[in-house]
Image (cartoon, helix red, strand yellow):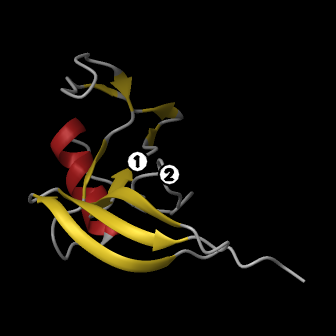
Amino acid sequence: MKKKLHEEIIDSETVYSSNLVDVVKDTVRLPNGTLTVRETEKHRGVVTMLAVIQEAIIMVRQFRHACDKTPLKLPDGTLNLGEIPDDAARRELVEETGYVPGKLKRLLHFYVSSGYCSER
């Protein structure tokens, strides 16, 4: 028999809200009955593009405030409200590189840091 791996939300409070994320404080009941608090970031989602032009992978340098650096990275961006990932991928690739994508193919779908954030 498999163990129940679900946490029941007893109470939920949004402690911060912006146009990008909400920070939520949940009181949850663990499978063993213990109550604890989970603080999570609810995110609209992001897209990252692996753009290939003539067998070359397109990367960009962009200042990122969170790490206070300008890393070499794949083009990426946050979904606008109501935007589907394919549309966001097209928009972000044009914004960051000037390239207009032809065919799109979804390669992966995953949570970036599932311990505290819903961003995927």
Mark 1 or mark 2, which is nearer the start of the sequence? 1
Q: Along the line of sight, which residue is nearer the eye, 86 or 117?
A: 117
Location of residue 23 with respect to 13 vertically, above or below: above
Q: Do residues under tags 2 and 1 come within 8 Å of each other at their CB atoms?
A: no
Q: Which residue, as the protein is rendered here, is positioned at the far top?
A: 69
Circle 2 or circle 1, nearest the eye? 2
Image spot of residue 46 (x, y percent): 33, 55
How crowded pointer 2 is (Cα within 10 Å; few <14, some 14-19, many 20+) is rated as few
Q: Secondary structure at mark 1?
A: loop
Residue 19 x %, y %: 9, 60
Image x and y of residue 72, in percent:
36, 21
* Viewer can see residue 5: yes
In front: 117, or 47? 117
The amino acid type of the residue labelled 2 equals: Gly
- Residue, far front: 34
Quickly name the residue at label 2.
115
For numbered disc 2, what is the local secondary structure? loop
Of 93 and 47, which appears nearest the observer?
47
Position of the N terminus by quadrant: bottom right
* Residue occupying the point 16% across, 56% down: 20
Q: Is 60 placed left or right of 113 in the picture? A: left
Q: How far apart are the two marked residues, 2 and 1, measured between alpha carbons? A: 24 Å
Q: Is residue 119 visible?
A: no
Mark 1, Cα crowd under 10 Å, few <14 / some 14-19 / many 20+, is many
Q: Amino acid at mark 1?
A: Met
User: How many marks overall?
Assistant: 2
User: Which residue occupies the foreground of this view, 100 or 23?
Assistant: 23
Looking at the rendered structure, which numbered label has been put on residue 68? Answer: none
Relative to 102, say whether 64 is above or below. Answer: above
Q: Which residue is the site of mark 1?
A: 49
Measured from the top left, where is residue 115 in percent x and y? 50, 51
Residue 114 vs 64, above or below: the answer is below
